[in-house]
Image: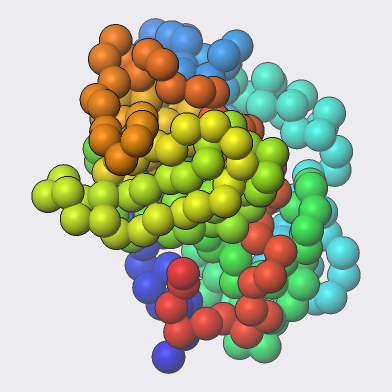
Amino acid sequence: MSVLPALQAELASATNRLLATAATLSDADLAVPSLLPGWTRGHVLAHVAQGAASHVNLLTWAKTGVRTPQYASMAARSAAIEAAAVHSAARHLTDLEAGAARLAAAIRDLPDHAWSASVEGMRPPPHPAWYALIRRLREIGVHHVDLDAGYGPADWPEPFVLRELHDTFACWPRGRGPLSEVVIKRTSGQTLTRWGDLGTGPAVEGTPCDMLAWLSGRSHGEGVNLVTMGRSFTQISGGAGLPEPPPWLTMPAPADLPTTPPKDYP
């Protein structure tokens, strides 16, 4: 048994949660700015809907062996999002549902051997096709928050948070980041994970959800604490005093992923 069934179930749940939120939004709601600078909620939904088609392209590449890029170009991607951003709420919901159905069918129909095929997003490195499921989960989970429509980082499922933290540090610019150490703790204070030798600067600690929200740019650092001389000092005023984290996930995938879908990930 590989991780694929669990990822498919997680993706179905995340998609349904996003669709439920999208179904509550009116035309006026979609014209409101999202949490992403320069994008309305309509832009976010257009991107997520078109992202499903882009992942179908990657699975088509894996199935056929014919290079099928996610998007024709970054310019074409941006133009398509701009064009669709102004669609009605009903049209957005229809596009999201249709994209999700197409992607689910592509996942269901992919032969077992094709999950090990190498594909590539708009940026390197290449990655095995099975990791496309994780990339789609990331896209849905993070952009659901970006809608600023009642779903926030606290609503992220724990498996999603722990996996994204793992990949954040797998892609970390070691030696060049503004933090020396990141400590992930449960709300009880128990240490879950400690990442060191990250760069120069202070150490920080926080719960998985608070840390991922800050590192991914989805919070100002609420709940993330500076650690000085072995003591932690709770940040106030929305994370005042924290350094700026490095750009999040400058690579779309870790460089050393197993080719064959593993039993668990991470």
Count of marks placed on residues: 0
The image shows residue 217 at horizontal and vertical percentages of 49, 28
Q: Quadrant of residue 120?
A: bottom right
x and y, in percent, of residue 2 in the image: 46, 85
Rendering colour mode = rainbow
Residue 68 at what x, y percent from top left? 83, 59
Query: Foreground: 188 or 217?
Result: 188
The residue sitting at the front extreme is 229
Observer-nearest of 171 and 133: 171
Residue at left offset 57%, top offset 51%: 197
Which residue occupies the foreground of this view, 3 or 171?
171
Q: Which image quadrant: the N terminus?
A: bottom left
Q: Is residue 202 above or below residue 36?
A: below
Taking depth in this image into account, of 200 and 23 the one nearest to the observer is 200
Q: Can residue 150 be seen at all in this image of the molecule?
A: no
Residue 155 in view, yes or no? yes
8 on left or right of 224: right
Left or right of 61, for residue 108: left
Residue at figure coordinates x 65%, y 57% from the top left:
253
Q: Is residue 245 above or below residue 158?
A: above
Q: Residue at x 56, y 81 (%)?
A: 261
Residue 249 appears in which quarter of the rendering?
top right
Left or right: 256 as drawn, with respect to 71:
left
Q: Residue at x 29, y 21 (%)?
A: 235
Image x and y of residue 240, in percent: 37, 13
Q: Is residue 221 above or below residue 139?
A: above
Q: Is residue 39 left or right of residue 148?
A: right
